[in-house]
Image: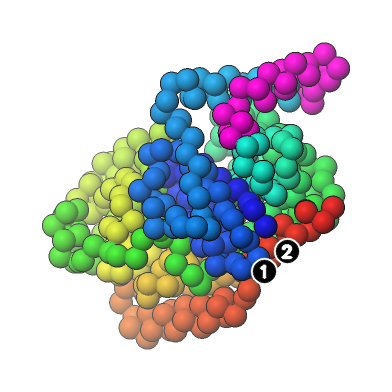
Amino acid sequence: MKIAFYINPSNLKAGGIFTYSIGILKLLIASDEISKIYLIYSGDQKKYFSDYLNDKVEPVVIDREDKITAISYSVSFFLYELFIIYKDYLKFPDKINFFKTLSHLLNPYLRKLKKLKIDLLHVPVQFSPVYEAPFPIITTMHDLQEFHYPEFFSASERLHRAINCKKAIPNSSHVIVSFEHVKEDVLKYFEMDKKNISVCPPPFAEEWFSIKTFTQKEMLKRKFELPENFILYPAATWQHKNHSALIDAVSSLRKRGVDISMICTGNKTEYYSILKKRIDELNLSKHIKFLGIITEEDLIGLFKIASAVVIPTLYEAGSGPMYEAMRYGTPVLASNVTSLPESIGDYRFIFDPRNIEELGRLIERILTDDQFRKDNLNNSMKRLEIFKKYNYSKNFVEVYKKVLDR
């Protein structure tokens, strides 16, 4: 089986989607049923994939920094969006096929993929760089958060996501999701045959990062001026990640004399300015740091030395940092939303993300109660053992076969 596997050029800022892509790529490389993988990525991502390239994995570089390529793809993307708007929203399907035809002619991804004679393309992000291609396209849909929290998106963002979903779902030969609740959302909000969507969990127990080394504690402390003890929250500053609750919980705990600091990593979105203002209002700038996007070596190092990982998210398809904390032997607490309670497997370690008092109590306990910390770590070990028994690659390969057998 010859497949193409697409790495979105924006993934490095897209939080867990990039690490998810790495995790799935590792599964596919290990599968004996896949003979060839064409790994599609942009030129600036080469350093992340050099260790994976061999006779089985061949790079296909689309240089999005090249002006002609960038313009060509942007125009292609715009024309296909026009096609979707006219076809699905304005209901003029007979008069706008030239938009689609021209879009395909200009698309640099489609031109390269046609030459490879692949069996299928797997896009491990919500939106593919090509549609209506002469080969099957399998898309991973991570979430439909905008239907649950529309207030977190501007009108233009909601329209953009709606158009992209209108492109992705009908034009995918098959849709993969990681959790049952995401499958239910896709079926609820879009017309789709149940047989064309599958739940394929990512390899929860396996290493997702592209590297194996990590930065040592003393170097991290000097580099980031870290306190001796801190809680860690690795997440881009999107509003639904709910950093504000963690900021307020830290403030409350410090007022009660608890010596606590917080380190956050991940892309600083526009919402970060609101969080920064709140930190300054509470005089917490010495105790709460947002480091932005850091290297994988540094992030793994932070996981290993953090006092606890705390995940107060309001919505999540699934939490990569939860599994990473489990793998690196760090106590972890998570909110009681979507798949997180099922994943962590013990109600003692979950909380209502809107209840600051409850969150504060749980953080204080994980920092001060040795038996509670021990129970948390033991629970993580048990959960990992359960995850290890699951044959993750089989699900993905079966979806590929199902699509090709049609």
Q: Residues within 10 Å of mark 1 (few under 14, many from 20)?
A: some
Pointer 2 with pointer 1, Cβ within 8 A: yes
Furthest-top residue in this view: 95
Residue at 28% across, 58% down: 298
Pick whichever, 130 or 304, lies toward us.
130
Q: Residue 255 has which mark?
A: none
Q: Report the magenta stretch's main SS.
A: helix
Residue 366: name its quadrant: bottom left
Q: Where's the N terminus, which quadrant?
A: bottom right
Q: Residues within 10 Å of mark 2 (few under 14, many from 20)?
A: few
Q: x%, y% of residue 372?
A: 40, 81
Pick whichever, 381 or 122, lies toward us.
122
Residue at 40% across, 43% down: 45
State whether residue 25 is above or below residue 85.
below
Q: Which residue is mark 1?
A: 394
Residue at 57% across, 53% down: 37
Residue 87 falls inside the magenta stretch: yes
Q: Report helix, strand or loop for mark 1.
A: helix
Residue 311: name its quadrant: bottom left
The reply, left or right, for residue 2 in relation to residue 136 is left
Residue 35: name its quadrant: bottom right
Inspect the image, locate mark 1, and give the three-letter code of the amino acid beneath it.
Lys
Q: x%, y% of residue 230?
A: 27, 63
Q: Which residue is mark 2?
A: 398
Q: For the magenta stretch, what is the residue range? A: 86-112
Q: Is residue 341 visible?
A: no
